[in-house]
Image (tube, rainbow, N blue to C red):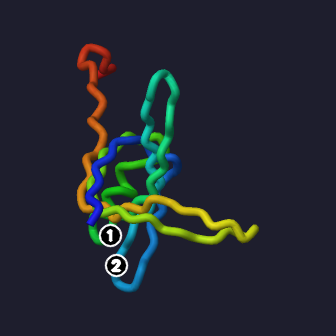
Amino acid sequence: MLQLTAAGNLALDPEVRQVGETEVANFLLLVNKKVKGEEFVTALKCSVWGPRAKVVSDFLSKGSQVTITGQGHIDTYETKNGETRAQLVVNVNDFVLPPKPKVDADAMPF
């Protein structure tokens, strides 16, 4: 089993759909890393199943920062051009929502 923990930002808004009796939220997480001044980006295709899928759709959107933990695997597929490609897929068990922005009480109009 491949257990992953990753922190990154959502590339797009999450998509929620119904699979049988269960909801699933899918999103693409981009993880950045700098090595010797060069930046590398890894894309993770993430899925959150069950009641937590609604939490993902309610609180995450494009650009949101999130930390995920889950089981990963490599999924291979063939493009329309006949090329074989691979992507890292994560079945998310746990995630941490981004921190709430701090509110300056002195700046409040009321």
Q: Which residue type carries mark 2?
A: Thr
Q: Which residue is farthest right?
A: 81
Q: Is the residue marked by circle 1 packed among few (<14), some (14-19), or many (20+) residues within 10 Å?
A: many
Q: Secondary structure at mark 2?
A: strand
Q: Secondary structure at mark 1?
A: strand
Residue 55 in which image quadrant: bottom left
The answer to which of marks 1 and 2 sits earlier in the sequence is: 2
Which residue is at a point 29% across and 61% down the rendered structure image? 2
Residue beneath disc 2: 22
Which residue is at a point 44% across and 66% down the rendered structure image? 16
Residue 10 in the image: state x and y as whole percent. Answer: 45, 46
**Up-down: is 38 above or below 1?**
above
Q: Which residue is farthest top?
A: 106
Q: Is residue 31 left or right of residue 108?
A: right
Q: Which residue type carries mark 1?
A: Trp
Residue 107 in the image: state x and y as whole percent. Answer: 31, 16
Q: Is residue 78 left or right of residue 45?
A: right
Q: Quadrant of the N terminus?
A: bottom left
Q: Which residue is farthest bottom?
A: 20
Number of numbered discs: 2
Q: Quadrant of the C terminus?
A: top left
Which residue is at a point 68% across and 68% down the rendered structure image? 79
Residue beneath disc 1: 49
Q: Are marks 1 and 2 in contact (CB under 8 Å)?
A: yes
Residue 88 in the image: state x and y as whole percent. Answer: 45, 59
Residue closest to the eye, 24 or 38: 38
Q: Which mark is residue 7?
A: none
Q: Is the residue marked by circle 2 packed among few (<14), some (14-19), or many (20+) residues within 10 Å?
A: few
Residue 102 in the image: state x and y as whole percent. Answer: 27, 26
Q: CA distance from mark 1 to mark 2?
A: 7 Å
